[in-house]
Image (cartoon, rainbow, N blue to C red):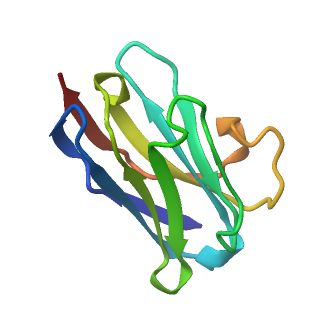
C-alpha cells in the first residue's frame, strides 16, 4: 500500500503560479512512477504529467507543456508539480497517483495507476 496526500492547491489569478506537493508513505516511494491528473467539474479525469522512478523521464499533456514542471525528491518521498502561467482552464481538482510499472503504456491511462491521493483544488480566476 502507498498512501498519497496532495497539498498546495488554492485560488490564484490567471498568469500566476502554484506548486503542488504529493507526499507518499508506505512502500518504497522510489519504486513508483508518479503521475498527476486533474478533473474539472463535469469533465472526465485527464492526464497532466508523469515522472519516472528516478526522475529522469518526464512527460506532459500538450495543454500544460512549457508551463508545468514535474519533479520529485525521493529522499523526501515527495513529488511536485510546479504550475506557472496558469489559465482559467487549469481549474480542477488535481490528483497524484502511483504506478508500480516503469513503462506503463499508455502512461496517460488512469487505470495504470494503483494508488491515488484525495486531490487538491486549484482555482484560477480570470
Q: Quadrant of the N terminus?
A: bottom right
Q: Can residue 105 be seen in this view?
A: yes
Viewer-closest of 49 and 62: 62
Measuring 27% from the left and 48% from the top, which residue is drawn there? 17
Measuring 58% from the left and 46% from the top, which residue is drawn there? 49
Q: Where is residue 57 in the image (x, y as percent from the top left)?
A: 71, 61
Q: Quadrant of the C terminus?
A: top left
Residue at the top extreme of this rendering: 42
Q: In this view, does 18 lie above or below 60?
A: below
Q: Where is residue 113 in the image (x, y as percent from the top left)?
A: 66, 48
Q: Where is residue 108 in the image (x, y as percent from the top left)?
A: 69, 37
Relative to 75, is 120 on the left or the right? left
Q: Is residue 27 visible?
A: no
Measuring 32% from the left and 56% from the top, which residue is drawn there? 19
Q: Is residue 26 above or below residue 93?
A: below
Viewer-closest of 95 and 60: 60
Measuring 45% from the left and 82% from the top, which residue is drawn there? 76
Q: How many labels does the image show?
A: 0
Amino acid at each position: 500500500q502507498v498512501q498519497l496526500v496532495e497539498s498546495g492547491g488554492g485560488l490564484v489569478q490567471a498568469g500566476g503560479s502554484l506548486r503542488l506537493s504529493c507526499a507518499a508513505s508506505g512502500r518504497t516511494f522510489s519504486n513508483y512512477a508518479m503521475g498527476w491528473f486533474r478533473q474539472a467539474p463535469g469533465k472526465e479525469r485527464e492526464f497532466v504529467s508523469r515522472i519516472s522512478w528516478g526522475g529522469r523521464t518526464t512527460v506532459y499533456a500538450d495543454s500544460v507543456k512549457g508551463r508545468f514542471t514535474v519533479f520529485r525528491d525521493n529522499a523526501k518521498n515527495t513529488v511536485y508539480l510546479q504550475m506557472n502561467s496558469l489559465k482559467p482552464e487549469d481549474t480542477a481538482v488535481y490528483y497524484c497517483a502511483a504506478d508500480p510499472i516503469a513503462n506503463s503504456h499508455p502512461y496517460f491511462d488512469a487505470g495504470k495507476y494503483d494508488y491515488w491521493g484525495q486531490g487538491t483544488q486549484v482555482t484560477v480566476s480570470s
